[in-house]
Image (cartoon, rainbow, N blue to C red):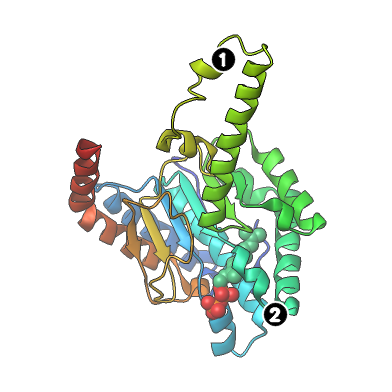
Amino acid sequence: MAGSRLSFSPSVDLKKEKPDEMVTSGVLASLQNFLRKCLIAVLSYGPMPRHIAFIMDGNRRYAKFRSIQQGAGHRVGFSALIANLLYCYEMGVKYITVYAFSIDNFKRDPSEVQSLMQLMEEKINELLENRSVINKVNCKINFWGNLDLLCEPVRVAAQKLMASTAGNTGIVLSVCMPYNSTSEIVNAVNEVCSERREMLQREHAGYGNGHAAKNGAHSEISVADLDQHMYSAGCPDPDIVIRTSGETRLSNFLLWQTTFSHLQNPDPLWPEFSFRHLVWSILQYQRAYPYLEQNRNLAKKQM
Ligand SMILES: CC(C)=CCC/C(C)=C/CC/C(C)=C/COP(=O)(O)OP(=O)(O)O
């Protein structure tokens, strides 16, 4: 990561869809890069988050306020996602998780759902074909959710992107779609139950060699059992959850994983959420850090 130079113009062809602050060139861009690096150096004196989760809210309102088509708001939202991924990488944040499509979003107007799905397909295929962003940050991309609910072209593209980035060791981007937390938890419970059912059936049929007893198939389901079956298995819980546009609900997002997360609801709409907002969020997290740690340690002692 050290010495990598992240500038947003040439290799990422997002020209028509860039948030305003990304449209810079020449001396101004160099100055911006320099100032960004200085700010990151100052920030890194404090505790840095390992994992930031975003509820990318406000794309339609952005389109409405700017009198552009609704779908164009989501396009600028995608550019904001890429910009923030690059900023996070530069700051050394290892995990980014975004709420891209909730299972409830299927209840929206069919034409909006279709246009969102087309955008997902287009952008995922763009990431597959043009590797500049992924290579720059050596990004591993996960999709968390019930992929069976997606139409085939989006599902296939998502699976290809996951497979083609599985070996990358830089920043990890987890895209939640189609996702909600309650179905993630129900899915995990069902997986643990069917795993145990299989073990016990094998045991009864005489093939188990004590496997079921060794693996605790007779004991109660524990938090650790469920942890292993969440989409987030192996990923630390988010340190910060940011819901843009000032909304204060979690809307069924990462309920299992956010017990100790610092929740923030900054005013900007997602397409407007930029470097300075990210810096401010991290500063707020750093200010709350001693209290967050105290809570975490207290909970550990009580367990
Ligand atoms: C490939 C990939 C990861 C693409 C992600 C693109 C993207 C930014 C999706 C956001 C989708 C969404 C429903 C956001 C919520 O804003 P909203 O539409 O509910 O807007 P509102 O809050 O103003 O109503």
Residue reaching furthest to the front: 204
Q: Tell us which disc is closer to us: 1 or 2.
A: 1
Return the x and y of residue 154 as percentages of the image width and height: 76, 57
Residue at the (36%, 60%) spot, across then down: 35
For residue 125, the mark is none
Q: Quadrant of residue 34?
A: bottom left
Specify whether 8 is left or right of 121. left
> Toward the viewer: 154 or 79?
154
For mark 1, does the 10 Å Cα neighbourhood hold few (<14), some (14 to 19), or many (20 or more) residues? some
> Toward the viewer: 15 or 197?
197
- Mark 2 residue's CB less than 8 Å from ligand 1: no
Residue at the (47%, 46%) spot, across then down: 95
Residue at the (20%, 36%) spot, across then down: 301
> Toward the viewer: 291 or 161?
291
Q: Quadrant of residue 69?
A: bottom right
The three-letter amino acid code for the residue at tag 1 is His
- Mark 1 residue's CB less than 8 Å from ligand 1: no
Is the C-beta separation of discs 1 and 2 under 8 Å?
no
Residue reaching furthest to the right: 152
Return the x and y of residue 281 as percentages of the image width and height: 33, 62
Specify whether 143 is left or right of 99. right
For mark 2, does the 10 Å Cα neighbourhood hold few (<14), some (14 to 19), or many (20 or more) residues? few
Ligand 1's image quarter is bottom right
For residue 211, the mark is 1
Label 2 belongs to which residue? 109
Q: Quadrant of residue 263?
A: bottom left
